[in-house]
Amino acid sequence: MQTAPTSVWLDSPDRYGRISRWLHWGMALLFAWQFVGMGLRLALGRTPLVSFFVGSHSSVGLLLMVLVLLRGAWGLANARRRPPHGTGWLGRAAAAGHGALYLLMAVVPLLALVRAYGSGRAFTWFNTLPLWGASARNEALMAPANAAHGLLAWTLLALVAGHVGMVLLHRWWWRDGVAQRMVGRTR
């Protein structure tokens, strides 16, 4: 069996490598799962369908927290090889938008995990790996997430929608090949 050259795994100025793309698209699917579940909860209330999604919300959130840390470390390790954001105000806006996405992708699940710990309830990841046992409830740990987790999560969704909008603009209006960097194919 032939193995792919190292260059397809690492980022380059022309495109993101396989690891970056797998992290990007895997996390996109997991965030979609989270937002679909919460959207259904808001729209339908407590139903078996909603329970199917929401029942995994905390475990998927922890998985996303781990993946965003891995993705951030991988991004820093590849920082000099990565495709540039561009020049001028549009490049600065792209860099700021990506920075805001990364910040919220880390803060939103972190707040929820701190709240879960402060709740005093035991936490078992995907019903298999116990991470902490029951303890005394700590309102001070819960308060920041109670105040900001949902609001910041919906803000993250708005940023994701803007991100997708810019991808579509690059792909169909400007036709500059920027969108292809995360797909893996270049012109």
Image (cartoon, rainbow, N blue to C red):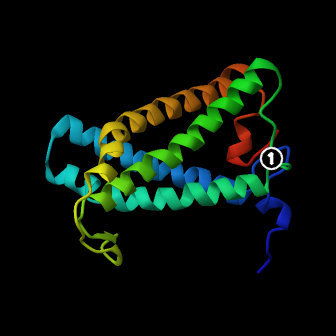
Residue 17 lies left or right of residue 161; in this view the side is right
Pinpoint residue 181: horizontal percent, then vertical percent: 74, 42
Residue 124 lies left or right of residue 170; in this view the side is left
**Residue 36 against residue 123 in the figure, above or below:** above
| The C terminus sits in image quarter | top right
Answer with the quarter of the image where residue 36 lies: top left
Pinpoint residue 148: horizontal percent, then vertical percent: 37, 37
Residue 50 lies left or right of residue 185; in this view the side is left
Residue at horizontal 59 percent and vertical 35 percent from the top: 100
SS type, badge 1: loop
Residue at horizontal 49 percent and vertical 46 percent from the top: 107
**Residue 170 against residue 44 in the figure, above or below:** above
Give the residue at the far bottom of this rendering: 1
Pinpoint residue 78: horizontal percent, then vertical percent: 79, 54
**Mark 1 is on which residue type?**
Arg
Residue at horizontal 74 percent and vertical 21 percent from the top: 90
Residue identifier under label 1: 82
Pinpoint residue 81: horizontal percent, then vertical percent: 85, 50
Residue 57 lies left or right of residue 69; in this view the side is left
